Image (cartoon, helix red, strand yellow):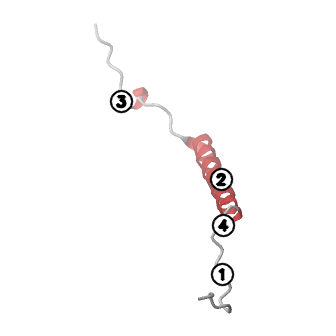
Amino acid sequence: MVKIIPGNKARQGGWGRHGLRILIAALLLIFVAWGIAEIYGEMIDTNTPADQGQTPDS
């Protein structure tokens, strides 16, 4: 025979504070990784603009 379970007893618990802490920590880690990638990208950038005051030799 099939046991009937009411809907409010069959549900899982909510996310609560634990889930919120995980989401906030993940967001902070994303920002740190983005910042490191930006700094690294600026360090390896070899396409620096030439001096605007000089004219190229023709």
Q: Mark 3 or mark 2, which has the lower sequence index?
A: 3
Q: What residue is shown with label 3?
A: 7
Do the numbered discs 4 and 1 sit on residues whose CB atoms are within 8 Å?
Answer: no
- Residue 15: mark: none
Do the numbered discs 3 and 2 sit on residues whose CB atoms are within 8 Å?
Answer: no
Residue at 66% of width from left, 66% of height from top? 46
Quadrant of image for the C terminus:
bottom right
Q: Mark 1 or mark 3, which has the lower sequence index?
A: 3
Whether residue 47 is situated above or below residue 32 in the rendered picture: below
**Amino acid found under the numbered disc labelled 1:** Ala
**Amino acid found under the numbered disc labelled 3:** Gly
Count residues near mark 2 (Cα–Cα under 10 Å), then give few for <14, some for 14-19, many for 20+: few
**35 and 51: which one is in front?**
51
Q: Which callout, 2 or 1, points to the residue nearer the camera? A: 1
Whether residue 24 is situated above or below residue 53 in the rendered picture: above
Q: Which callout, 4 or 3, points to the residue nearer the camera? A: 4
Q: Mark 2 or mark 1, which has the lower sequence index?
A: 2
Q: What residue is shown with label 1?
A: 50
**42 and 16: which one is in front?**
42
**14 and 37: which one is in front?**
37
Residue at 36% of width from left, 21% of height from top? 5
Q: What residue is shown with label 4?
A: 46
- Residue 33: mark: 2
- Mark-to-mark CA distance, 4 and 2: 22 Å
